[in-house]
Amino acid sequence: MRSQPSVSISKNILIMKEDASDNAPRFLSDGYDFHVSESSITGQKVGQMEVEDVDERDRGQLTFRLIGPGSEL
C-alpha cells in the first residue's frame, strides 16, 4: 500500500491592530507559526498569540483581523 505524499504550504500574514492610545501593542514573540491540518474543521483553534497593550481599556480583550494578501485564508 502506497501512502499519499504530504503537501506543505507556507504563507506569511501581516497582522495589524488599530490602537487609539499612546502605546502600541507589543507581540511577546517575534513570530508565530501555526500549522493547520487539511482535515481541520471551520472554527478550530490553530494557535495562540500573546500580545501586551498597557493602554488596553477592555482588560485584555484585543481584536485582530487579517488584511491584504493571504487574508482569504
Image (cartoon, helix red, strand yellow):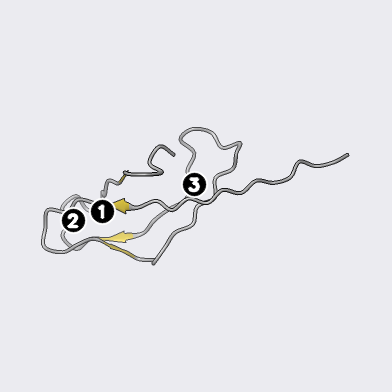
Marks 2/3 in contact by CB < 8 Å: the verdict is no
Q: Residue at x 61, y 36 (%)?
A: 39
Q: Position of residue 31 (x, y in %)?
A: 42, 62
Which of the pair 15/69 is nearer the observer?
69
Circle 1: element type: loop
Most extreme residue toward the right is 1
| Label 1: how many Cα within 10 Å (few below 14, some 14–19, many 20+) | few
Q: Position of residue 49 (x, y in %)?
A: 39, 56
Q: Residue at x 49, y 46 (%)?
A: 46
Circle 2: element type: loop
* Left or right, residue 59 beside residue 2: left
Which amino acid does the dot numbered 3 rest on?
A: Val
Label 1 belongs to which residue?
Answer: 60
- Which of the two labelled residues, at mark 2 and mark 3, occupies the earlier sequence position? 3
Label ID, residue 56 = 2
Mark 2 → mark 3, Cα distance in angstroms: 25 Å
Q: Position of residue 40 (x, y in %)?
A: 56, 37
Most extreme residue toward the top is 42
Mark 1 → mark 2, Cα distance in angstroms: 7 Å
Q: Residue at x 35, y 52 (%)?
A: 14
Residue 70 falls in which quadrant of the image? top left
- Which of the two labelled residues, at mark 1 and mark 3, occupies the earlier sequence position? 3
Quadrant where the C terminus sits is top left
Label 3 belongs to which residue?
Answer: 46
Marks 1/3 in contact by CB < 8 Å: the verdict is no
Judged by depth in the image, the label closer to the viewer, 1 or 3, is 3
Which amino acid does the dot numbered 2 rest on?
A: Glu
